[in-house]
Image (spheres, rainbow, N blue to C red):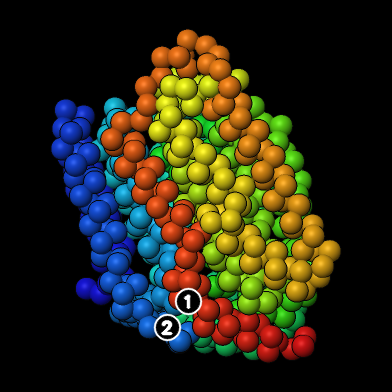
Amino acid sequence: MGLLSLAIWTPIVFGVVLLALGRDDQARSVRWIALIGAIASFLVTLPLYDGFKLGTSAMQFVEKGSWIQRFNVNYHLGVDGISLWFVLLTAFINVVVVIASWEAITSRVSQYMASFLILSGLMIGVFAALDGLLFYVFFEATLIPMYLIIGIWGGPNKIYAAFKFFLYTLLGSLLLLIALIYLYNKSGGSFDILTWHKLPLGGSVQTLLFFAFFAAFAVKVPMWPVHTWLPDVHVEAPTGGSAVLAAIMLKLGAYGFLRFSMPIAPDAAREWAWLMIALSLIAVIYVGLVALVQQDMKKLVAYSSVAHMGFVTLGFFIFNDLGVSGGIVQMIAHGFVSGAMFLCIGVLYDRVHSREIASYGGVVNTMPKFAAFGLLFAMANCGLPGTAGFVGEWMVILGAVKSSFWMGAAAATALISGAAYTLWMFKRVYLGPVVNDDVKGLSDINSREFLMLALLAIAVLYMGIYPKPFTDVMNTSVADLLTHVAASKLN
Protein backbone atom coordinates (compact mmCIF):
# COMPACT_ATOMS: atom_id res chain seq x y z
CA MET A 1 0.00 0.00 0.00
CA GLY A 2 1.37 3.40 -1.00
CA LEU A 3 1.81 6.39 1.29
CA LEU A 4 -1.29 8.20 0.01
CA SER A 5 -3.45 5.12 0.49
CA LEU A 6 -2.11 4.83 4.03
CA ALA A 7 -2.95 8.50 4.64
CA ILE A 8 -6.52 7.96 3.39
CA TRP A 9 -7.36 4.56 4.84
CA THR A 10 -5.57 4.60 8.21
CA PRO A 11 -8.07 7.04 9.80
CA ILE A 12 -11.01 5.36 8.04
CA VAL A 13 -10.02 1.92 9.40
CA PHE A 14 -9.64 3.33 12.91
CA GLY A 15 -13.05 4.98 12.48
CA VAL A 16 -14.67 1.67 11.51
CA VAL A 17 -13.05 0.00 14.55
CA LEU A 18 -14.56 2.69 16.79
CA LEU A 19 -17.99 2.16 15.24
CA ALA A 20 -17.67 -1.54 16.03
CA LEU A 21 -17.03 -0.73 19.71
CA GLY A 22 -20.02 1.57 19.84
CA ARG A 23 -20.85 1.65 23.58
CA ASP A 24 -20.58 4.62 25.94
CA ASP A 25 -19.41 2.40 28.81
CA GLN A 26 -16.18 2.02 26.82
CA ALA A 27 -15.79 5.78 26.30
CA ARG A 28 -12.34 5.94 27.89
CA SER A 29 -10.95 3.22 25.61
CA VAL A 30 -12.69 4.80 22.62
CA ARG A 31 -10.98 8.15 23.24
CA TRP A 32 -7.55 6.57 23.47
CA ILE A 33 -8.09 4.48 20.33
CA ALA A 34 -9.27 7.63 18.52
CA LEU A 35 -6.18 9.55 19.64
CA ILE A 36 -3.86 6.70 18.63
CA GLY A 37 -5.64 6.54 15.25
CA ALA A 38 -5.36 10.29 14.71
CA ILE A 39 -1.66 10.36 15.64
CA ALA A 40 -0.93 7.32 13.45
CA SER A 41 -2.82 8.97 10.58
CA PHE A 42 -0.70 12.10 10.95
CA LEU A 43 2.58 10.18 11.21
CA VAL A 44 1.96 8.31 7.93
CA THR A 45 1.65 11.67 6.12
CA LEU A 46 5.08 12.94 7.26
CA PRO A 47 7.07 10.78 4.76
CA LEU A 48 5.13 12.58 2.00
CA TYR A 49 6.82 15.86 2.94
CA ASP A 50 10.17 14.21 3.59
CA GLY A 51 10.19 12.42 0.23
CA PHE A 52 8.68 15.24 -1.84
CA LYS A 53 10.96 16.38 -4.67
CA LEU A 54 11.18 20.13 -5.24
CA GLY A 55 11.65 21.65 -8.68
CA THR A 56 9.09 19.51 -10.50
CA SER A 57 5.39 20.04 -11.11
CA ALA A 58 4.78 16.35 -11.81
CA MET A 59 2.49 14.34 -9.58
CA GLN A 60 4.39 12.40 -6.93
CA PHE A 61 3.65 9.28 -4.85
CA VAL A 62 1.36 8.19 -7.69
CA GLU A 63 -0.78 5.08 -7.20
CA LYS A 64 -3.02 3.67 -9.91
CA GLY A 65 -5.18 0.60 -10.04
CA SER A 66 -8.35 -0.36 -11.89
CA TRP A 67 -11.54 0.27 -9.91
CA ILE A 68 -14.57 0.09 -12.26
CA GLN A 69 -13.01 -1.45 -15.35
CA ARG A 70 -16.06 -1.20 -17.58
CA PHE A 71 -16.06 2.61 -17.39
CA ASN A 72 -12.30 3.03 -17.13
CA VAL A 73 -12.57 4.37 -13.57
CA ASN A 74 -9.30 4.05 -11.67
CA TYR A 75 -8.15 4.30 -8.09
CA HIS A 76 -5.65 6.97 -9.11
CA LEU A 77 -3.86 9.04 -6.47
CA GLY A 78 -1.04 11.57 -6.47
CA VAL A 79 -0.01 14.92 -5.00
CA ASP A 80 1.87 17.92 -6.30
CA GLY A 81 3.05 21.13 -4.66
CA ILE A 82 -0.52 22.47 -4.61
CA SER A 83 -2.11 19.55 -2.78
CA LEU A 84 0.67 18.20 -0.52
CA TRP A 85 0.23 20.64 2.36
CA PHE A 86 -3.51 20.02 2.56
CA VAL A 87 -2.95 16.32 3.17
CA LEU A 88 -0.66 17.15 6.10
CA LEU A 89 -2.94 19.92 7.37
CA THR A 90 -5.99 17.62 7.39
CA ALA A 91 -4.18 14.93 9.38
CA PHE A 92 -2.75 17.49 11.82
CA ILE A 93 -6.10 19.19 12.50
CA ASN A 94 -7.66 15.77 13.10
CA VAL A 95 -5.24 15.15 15.98
CA VAL A 96 -6.08 18.52 17.54
CA VAL A 97 -9.85 17.95 17.20
CA VAL A 98 -9.67 14.55 18.92
CA ILE A 99 -7.81 16.15 21.83
CA ALA A 100 -10.33 19.03 21.90
CA SER A 101 -13.30 16.63 22.06
CA TRP A 102 -11.85 14.52 24.89
CA GLU A 103 -14.19 15.74 27.65
CA ALA A 104 -16.76 17.81 25.76
CA ILE A 105 -18.50 14.79 24.19
CA THR A 106 -20.07 12.37 26.66
CA SER A 107 -22.75 10.60 24.59
CA ARG A 108 -22.16 8.36 21.57
CA VAL A 109 -18.45 8.98 21.93
CA SER A 110 -17.39 6.20 19.58
CA GLN A 111 -19.66 7.43 16.78
CA TYR A 112 -18.45 11.00 17.27
CA MET A 113 -14.76 10.11 17.14
CA ALA A 114 -15.34 7.69 14.27
CA SER A 115 -17.07 10.43 12.26
CA PHE A 116 -14.04 12.69 12.51
CA LEU A 117 -11.55 9.96 11.66
CA ILE A 118 -13.55 8.83 8.63
CA LEU A 119 -14.08 12.45 7.56
CA SER A 120 -10.32 13.06 7.77
CA GLY A 121 -9.58 10.13 5.46
CA LEU A 122 -12.24 11.22 2.96
CA MET A 123 -10.93 14.80 2.83
CA ILE A 124 -7.39 13.56 2.21
CA GLY A 125 -8.90 11.49 -0.60
CA VAL A 126 -10.27 14.69 -2.19
CA PHE A 127 -6.82 16.30 -2.16
CA ALA A 128 -5.09 13.18 -3.52
CA ALA A 129 -7.58 11.97 -6.18
CA LEU A 130 -6.42 12.14 -9.81
CA ASP A 131 -9.46 10.32 -11.18
CA GLY A 132 -12.52 12.52 -11.72
CA LEU A 133 -15.08 10.03 -10.44
CA LEU A 134 -12.90 9.10 -7.46
CA PHE A 135 -12.64 12.80 -6.65
CA TYR A 136 -16.42 13.14 -6.85
CA VAL A 137 -17.00 10.15 -4.57
CA PHE A 138 -14.63 11.51 -1.92
CA PHE A 139 -15.96 15.06 -2.38
CA GLU A 140 -19.57 13.99 -1.80
CA ALA A 141 -18.79 11.42 0.88
CA THR A 142 -17.35 14.13 3.14
CA LEU A 143 -20.91 15.48 3.51
CA ILE A 144 -22.13 12.37 5.33
CA PRO A 145 -19.96 12.42 8.49
CA MET A 146 -20.20 16.22 8.74
CA TYR A 147 -24.00 16.04 8.38
CA LEU A 148 -24.08 13.52 11.25
CA ILE A 149 -21.68 15.57 13.40
CA ILE A 150 -23.91 18.63 13.07
CA GLY A 151 -27.24 16.80 13.21
CA ILE A 152 -26.49 14.58 16.25
CA TRP A 153 -24.08 16.57 18.45
CA GLY A 154 -25.05 20.12 17.43
CA GLY A 155 -27.04 22.85 19.17
CA PRO A 156 -30.81 23.43 19.52
CA ASN A 157 -31.35 24.10 15.79
CA LYS A 158 -28.98 21.35 14.66
CA ILE A 159 -31.45 19.65 12.27
CA TYR A 160 -32.14 22.91 10.45
CA ALA A 161 -28.41 23.68 10.17
CA ALA A 162 -27.51 20.17 8.98
CA PHE A 163 -30.29 20.20 6.38
CA LYS A 164 -29.28 23.65 5.15
CA PHE A 165 -25.64 22.51 4.89
CA PHE A 166 -26.66 19.49 2.81
CA LEU A 167 -29.20 21.33 0.65
CA TYR A 168 -26.84 24.15 -0.34
CA THR A 169 -24.27 21.72 -1.70
CA LEU A 170 -26.73 19.47 -3.54
CA LEU A 171 -27.42 21.49 -6.70
CA GLY A 172 -23.76 22.37 -7.24
CA SER A 173 -22.77 18.75 -6.81
CA LEU A 174 -25.22 17.61 -9.49
CA LEU A 175 -23.84 20.17 -11.94
CA LEU A 176 -20.31 19.02 -11.09
CA LEU A 177 -21.28 15.43 -11.91
CA ILE A 178 -22.74 16.48 -15.26
CA ALA A 179 -19.49 18.34 -16.05
CA LEU A 180 -17.42 15.28 -15.15
CA ILE A 181 -19.55 13.02 -17.38
CA TYR A 182 -19.18 15.48 -20.28
CA LEU A 183 -15.39 15.51 -19.86
CA TYR A 184 -15.39 11.71 -19.69
CA ASN A 185 -17.15 11.49 -23.06
CA LYS A 186 -15.08 14.31 -24.57
CA SER A 187 -11.81 12.60 -23.62
CA GLY A 188 -12.80 9.30 -25.21
CA GLY A 189 -13.80 7.52 -22.02
CA SER A 190 -11.23 8.69 -19.49
CA PHE A 191 -11.76 10.06 -15.98
CA ASP A 192 -8.09 11.04 -15.69
CA ILE A 193 -8.00 14.65 -14.44
CA LEU A 194 -4.56 15.35 -15.93
CA THR A 195 -5.85 14.20 -19.34
CA TRP A 196 -8.76 16.63 -18.98
CA HIS A 197 -6.26 19.46 -18.44
CA LYS A 198 -5.04 18.96 -22.02
CA LEU A 199 -8.44 18.77 -23.76
CA PRO A 200 -9.00 21.37 -26.53
CA LEU A 201 -12.36 22.82 -25.53
CA GLY A 202 -14.32 25.59 -27.26
CA GLY A 203 -15.09 28.90 -25.56
CA SER A 204 -18.80 28.24 -24.95
CA VAL A 205 -18.10 24.74 -23.59
CA GLN A 206 -15.46 26.13 -21.27
CA THR A 207 -17.89 28.74 -19.98
CA LEU A 208 -20.53 26.11 -19.21
CA LEU A 209 -17.96 23.90 -17.49
CA PHE A 210 -16.58 26.86 -15.55
CA PHE A 211 -19.99 27.73 -14.11
CA ALA A 212 -20.78 24.08 -13.38
CA PHE A 213 -17.55 23.93 -11.37
CA PHE A 214 -18.35 27.32 -9.85
CA ALA A 215 -21.72 26.05 -8.59
CA ALA A 216 -20.03 23.18 -6.76
CA PHE A 217 -16.93 24.90 -5.44
CA ALA A 218 -18.18 28.44 -4.65
CA VAL A 219 -20.72 27.06 -2.17
CA LYS A 220 -18.00 25.07 -0.43
CA VAL A 221 -15.57 28.03 -0.10
CA PRO A 222 -18.13 29.70 0.54
CA MET A 223 -18.11 32.75 -1.73
CA TRP A 224 -20.53 35.65 -1.44
CA PRO A 225 -23.54 35.44 -1.97
CA VAL A 226 -23.79 31.66 -1.38
CA HIS A 227 -22.16 31.95 2.04
CA THR A 228 -25.29 32.25 4.16
CA TRP A 229 -25.31 28.58 5.23
CA LEU A 230 -21.94 28.90 7.00
CA PRO A 231 -22.85 31.07 10.04
CA ASP A 232 -25.90 28.90 10.83
CA VAL A 233 -23.88 25.70 10.59
CA HIS A 234 -21.02 27.06 12.71
CA VAL A 235 -23.38 28.24 15.44
CA GLU A 236 -25.08 24.84 15.71
CA ALA A 237 -22.07 22.56 15.10
CA PRO A 238 -20.10 21.18 18.08
CA THR A 239 -16.69 22.78 18.61
CA GLY A 240 -14.81 20.02 16.80
CA GLY A 241 -17.20 20.25 13.85
CA SER A 242 -16.70 24.01 13.56
CA ALA A 243 -12.91 23.59 13.73
CA VAL A 244 -12.79 20.98 10.95
CA LEU A 245 -15.35 22.81 8.83
CA ALA A 246 -13.37 26.06 8.95
CA ALA A 247 -9.89 24.55 8.86
CA ILE A 248 -10.35 21.94 6.12
CA MET A 249 -13.79 21.60 4.51
CA LEU A 250 -13.87 25.17 3.18
CA LYS A 251 -10.56 24.41 1.45
CA LEU A 252 -12.14 21.65 -0.65
CA GLY A 253 -13.96 24.25 -2.75
CA ALA A 254 -10.92 26.49 -3.18
CA TYR A 255 -8.84 23.45 -4.13
CA GLY A 256 -11.45 22.56 -6.76
CA PHE A 257 -10.85 25.89 -8.52
CA LEU A 258 -7.13 25.07 -8.77
CA ARG A 259 -7.56 21.48 -9.90
CA PHE A 260 -10.58 21.83 -12.19
CA SER A 261 -11.80 25.34 -13.06
CA MET A 262 -8.49 27.01 -13.97
CA PRO A 263 -6.64 24.21 -15.81
CA ILE A 264 -9.65 22.62 -17.57
CA ALA A 265 -11.37 25.88 -18.59
CA PRO A 266 -8.49 28.39 -18.78
CA ASP A 267 -10.18 30.63 -21.38
CA ALA A 268 -13.35 30.89 -19.32
CA ALA A 269 -11.33 31.39 -16.14
CA ARG A 270 -9.68 34.45 -17.68
CA GLU A 271 -12.88 35.71 -19.28
CA TRP A 272 -14.84 35.53 -16.02
CA ALA A 273 -11.97 36.53 -13.72
CA TRP A 274 -13.59 39.96 -13.27
CA LEU A 275 -16.65 38.29 -11.74
CA MET A 276 -14.55 36.14 -9.40
CA ILE A 277 -12.52 39.18 -8.34
CA ALA A 278 -15.67 41.24 -7.74
CA LEU A 279 -17.30 38.52 -5.62
CA SER A 280 -14.05 38.02 -3.71
CA LEU A 281 -13.71 41.74 -2.93
CA ILE A 282 -17.32 41.89 -1.76
CA ALA A 283 -16.56 39.00 0.59
CA VAL A 284 -13.39 40.68 1.82
CA ILE A 285 -14.96 44.12 2.42
CA TYR A 286 -18.71 43.68 2.97
CA VAL A 287 -18.65 40.42 4.94
CA GLY A 288 -15.88 41.86 7.11
CA LEU A 289 -18.26 44.68 8.02
CA VAL A 290 -21.04 42.17 8.72
CA ALA A 291 -18.68 40.41 11.17
CA LEU A 292 -18.25 43.70 13.01
CA VAL A 293 -21.87 43.75 14.24
CA GLN A 294 -22.14 40.14 15.43
CA GLN A 295 -22.95 39.44 19.08
CA ASP A 296 -22.30 35.69 18.88
CA MET A 297 -18.59 34.75 18.91
CA LYS A 298 -19.07 31.80 16.56
CA LYS A 299 -21.01 33.89 14.06
CA LEU A 300 -18.31 36.55 14.15
CA VAL A 301 -15.55 34.02 13.40
CA ALA A 302 -17.75 32.37 10.74
CA TYR A 303 -18.16 35.67 8.87
CA SER A 304 -14.44 36.26 9.40
CA SER A 305 -13.80 32.95 7.60
CA VAL A 306 -15.85 34.09 4.60
CA ALA A 307 -13.82 37.31 4.45
CA HIS A 308 -10.49 35.50 4.75
CA MET A 309 -11.46 32.95 2.09
CA GLY A 310 -12.27 35.92 -0.16
CA PHE A 311 -8.53 36.58 -0.16
CA VAL A 312 -7.99 33.04 -1.43
CA THR A 313 -10.25 33.32 -4.48
CA LEU A 314 -9.01 36.86 -5.16
CA GLY A 315 -5.43 35.57 -5.22
CA PHE A 316 -6.29 32.74 -7.62
CA PHE A 317 -8.02 34.88 -10.24
CA ILE A 318 -5.47 37.66 -10.56
CA PHE A 319 -3.29 35.07 -12.30
CA ASN A 320 0.16 35.91 -11.03
CA ASP A 321 2.54 33.86 -8.94
CA LEU A 322 2.26 36.04 -5.83
CA GLY A 323 -1.53 35.92 -5.94
CA VAL A 324 -1.94 32.17 -6.47
CA SER A 325 0.83 31.20 -4.04
CA GLY A 326 -0.56 33.71 -1.54
CA GLY A 327 -4.02 32.20 -1.90
CA ILE A 328 -2.69 28.71 -1.16
CA VAL A 329 -0.64 29.97 1.81
CA GLN A 330 -3.75 31.78 3.07
CA MET A 331 -5.70 28.50 2.89
CA ILE A 332 -3.13 26.75 5.08
CA ALA A 333 -2.82 29.69 7.50
CA HIS A 334 -6.60 30.00 7.76
CA GLY A 335 -6.71 26.31 8.64
CA PHE A 336 -4.49 26.92 11.67
CA VAL A 337 -5.96 30.27 12.76
CA SER A 338 -9.69 29.70 12.26
CA GLY A 339 -9.44 26.24 13.82
CA ALA A 340 -7.72 27.80 16.83
CA MET A 341 -10.34 30.57 17.11
CA PHE A 342 -13.20 28.08 17.18
CA LEU A 343 -11.42 25.88 19.71
CA CYS A 344 -10.89 28.91 21.97
CA ILE A 345 -14.62 29.65 21.78
CA GLY A 346 -15.20 25.98 22.64
CA VAL A 347 -13.03 26.26 25.76
CA LEU A 348 -15.19 29.13 27.02
CA TYR A 349 -18.46 27.47 25.97
CA ASP A 350 -17.58 24.27 27.87
CA ARG A 351 -17.35 26.36 31.06
CA VAL A 352 -20.11 28.98 30.70
CA HIS A 353 -22.39 27.42 28.02
CA SER A 354 -22.79 30.70 26.18
CA ARG A 355 -21.32 32.02 22.94
CA GLU A 356 -22.67 35.54 23.45
CA ILE A 357 -19.95 38.18 23.75
CA ALA A 358 -22.07 39.96 26.36
CA SER A 359 -21.77 36.93 28.67
CA TYR A 360 -18.05 37.56 29.12
CA GLY A 361 -15.63 40.25 30.20
CA GLY A 362 -12.40 40.19 32.16
CA VAL A 363 -11.55 36.57 31.28
CA VAL A 364 -7.83 37.46 31.47
CA ASN A 365 -8.22 37.90 35.24
CA THR A 366 -9.29 34.29 35.81
CA MET A 367 -7.72 32.52 32.79
CA PRO A 368 -4.37 34.23 32.09
CA LYS A 369 -2.79 31.27 30.23
CA PHE A 370 -5.84 30.90 28.03
CA ALA A 371 -5.95 34.67 27.40
CA ALA A 372 -2.33 34.55 26.16
CA PHE A 373 -3.30 31.96 23.54
CA GLY A 374 -6.44 33.93 22.71
CA LEU A 375 -4.36 37.06 22.10
CA LEU A 376 -1.94 35.22 19.79
CA PHE A 377 -4.76 33.76 17.68
CA ALA A 378 -6.59 37.10 17.62
CA MET A 379 -3.44 38.81 16.34
CA ALA A 380 -3.03 36.10 13.70
CA ASN A 381 -6.65 36.61 12.64
CA CYS A 382 -5.88 40.33 12.24
CA GLY A 383 -2.91 39.50 9.99
CA LEU A 384 -0.16 40.61 12.38
CA PRO A 385 3.36 40.20 10.89
CA GLY A 386 5.13 37.23 12.43
CA THR A 387 1.97 35.11 12.45
CA ALA A 388 0.58 32.76 9.80
CA GLY A 389 -2.34 35.12 9.14
CA PHE A 390 -0.02 37.77 7.71
CA VAL A 391 1.88 35.80 5.08
CA GLY A 392 -0.88 34.78 2.69
CA GLU A 393 -2.83 38.04 2.92
CA TRP A 394 0.31 40.08 2.29
CA MET A 395 1.22 37.98 -0.77
CA VAL A 396 -2.29 38.32 -2.18
CA ILE A 397 -2.30 42.10 -1.63
CA LEU A 398 1.10 42.36 -3.36
CA GLY A 399 -0.19 40.25 -6.24
CA ALA A 400 -3.35 42.37 -6.47
CA VAL A 401 -1.33 45.62 -6.52
CA LYS A 402 0.81 44.12 -9.29
CA SER A 403 -2.38 43.60 -11.27
CA SER A 404 -4.19 46.83 -10.28
CA PHE A 405 -3.37 49.35 -7.56
CA TRP A 406 -7.03 49.97 -6.72
CA MET A 407 -7.75 46.26 -6.44
CA GLY A 408 -4.87 45.91 -4.00
CA ALA A 409 -6.04 48.96 -2.05
CA ALA A 410 -9.56 47.53 -1.78
CA ALA A 411 -8.22 44.17 -0.58
CA ALA A 412 -5.98 45.89 1.97
CA THR A 413 -9.02 47.43 3.69
CA ALA A 414 -9.70 43.94 5.03
CA LEU A 415 -6.68 44.29 7.31
CA ILE A 416 -8.47 47.22 8.96
CA SER A 417 -11.88 45.56 9.26
CA GLY A 418 -10.25 42.29 10.36
CA ALA A 419 -8.41 44.09 13.15
CA ALA A 420 -11.60 45.96 14.09
CA TYR A 421 -13.92 42.97 14.59
CA THR A 422 -11.26 40.67 16.07
CA LEU A 423 -9.90 43.19 18.58
CA TRP A 424 -13.44 44.36 19.42
CA MET A 425 -14.34 40.79 20.36
CA PHE A 426 -11.07 40.25 22.24
CA LYS A 427 -11.49 43.47 24.23
CA ARG A 428 -15.04 42.68 25.32
CA VAL A 429 -14.40 39.01 26.14
CA TYR A 430 -10.94 39.05 27.70
CA LEU A 431 -10.08 42.54 28.95
CA GLY A 432 -11.39 44.82 31.66
CA PRO A 433 -12.80 43.89 35.08
CA VAL A 434 -14.63 40.62 35.78
CA VAL A 435 -18.25 41.29 34.83
CA ASN A 436 -20.21 38.45 36.44
CA ASP A 437 -20.02 35.38 38.67
CA ASP A 438 -19.67 33.03 35.70
CA VAL A 439 -16.42 34.69 34.65
CA LYS A 440 -15.29 34.99 38.27
CA GLY A 441 -15.63 31.24 38.70
CA LEU A 442 -13.70 30.27 35.55
CA SER A 443 -10.74 27.93 35.88
CA ASP A 444 -7.74 28.29 33.60
CA ILE A 445 -7.02 25.75 30.86
CA ASN A 446 -5.92 22.27 31.92
CA SER A 447 -2.98 20.35 30.44
CA ARG A 448 -5.11 18.80 27.67
CA GLU A 449 -6.41 22.18 26.53
CA PHE A 450 -2.92 23.67 26.84
CA LEU A 451 -1.54 20.94 24.56
CA MET A 452 -4.30 21.47 22.00
CA LEU A 453 -3.77 25.24 21.81
CA ALA A 454 0.02 24.96 22.01
CA LEU A 455 0.13 22.74 18.91
CA LEU A 456 -1.80 25.35 16.94
CA ALA A 457 0.24 28.22 18.42
CA ILE A 458 3.49 26.56 17.29
CA ALA A 459 2.06 26.10 13.78
CA VAL A 460 0.83 29.73 13.60
CA LEU A 461 4.18 31.15 14.74
CA TYR A 462 6.34 28.80 12.67
CA MET A 463 4.46 29.58 9.47
CA GLY A 464 4.47 33.31 10.24
CA ILE A 465 8.18 33.51 11.01
CA TYR A 466 9.49 31.01 8.45
CA PRO A 467 7.04 30.40 5.56
CA LYS A 468 9.77 29.22 3.16
CA PRO A 469 9.09 25.45 3.55
CA PHE A 470 5.46 26.08 2.61
CA THR A 471 6.17 28.26 -0.43
CA ASP A 472 9.10 26.14 -1.70
CA VAL A 473 6.83 23.12 -2.10
CA MET A 474 4.20 24.95 -4.15
CA ASN A 475 6.30 27.31 -6.34
CA THR A 476 6.94 24.98 -9.31
CA SER A 477 3.36 23.65 -9.43
CA VAL A 478 1.94 27.18 -9.26
CA ALA A 479 4.27 28.34 -12.06
CA ASP A 480 3.19 25.37 -14.20
CA LEU A 481 -0.50 26.12 -13.58
CA LEU A 482 -0.06 29.78 -14.53
CA THR A 483 1.87 28.83 -17.69
CA HIS A 484 -0.98 26.50 -18.65
CA VAL A 485 -3.63 29.18 -18.08
CA ALA A 486 -1.56 31.85 -19.88
CA ALA A 487 -1.36 29.62 -22.97
CA SER A 488 -5.13 29.88 -23.44
CA LYS A 489 -6.54 31.15 -26.73
CA LEU A 490 -7.65 34.51 -25.32
CA ASN A 491 -4.03 35.64 -24.96
Q: Position of residue 254 (x, y in %)?
A: 57, 62
Q: Is residue 296 visible?
A: no
Q: Position of residue 47 (x, y in %)?
A: 28, 71
Q: Looking at the picture, which amino acid does disc 2 mark?
A: Leu
Q: Position of residue 309 (x, y in %)?
A: 62, 55
Residue 216's label in the rendered image is none
Task: Name the residue nearer the viewer: 374 or 45.
Answer: 374
Q: Residue at x 77, y 86 (%)?
A: 490
Picture mark count:
2
Query: Disc 1 marks which residue?
Result: 472
SS category of the residue bearing label 2: loop
Whole-Å distance between the Cαs marked 2 and 1?
7 Å
For the residues bearing labels 2 and 1, Cβ distance under 8 angstroms: yes
Q: Looking at the picture, which amino acid does disc 1 mark?
A: Asp
Query: Disc 2 marks which residue?
Result: 54
| Residue 204 sits in quarter | bottom right
Q: Residue at x 66, y 49 (%)?
A: 307
Quadrant of the rendering where the N terminus is positioned = bottom left
Q: Is residue 142 above or below residue 266?
A: above
First in sequence: mark 2 or mark 1? 2
| Residue 290 sits in quarter | top right
Q: Is residue 11 above or below residue 434?
A: below
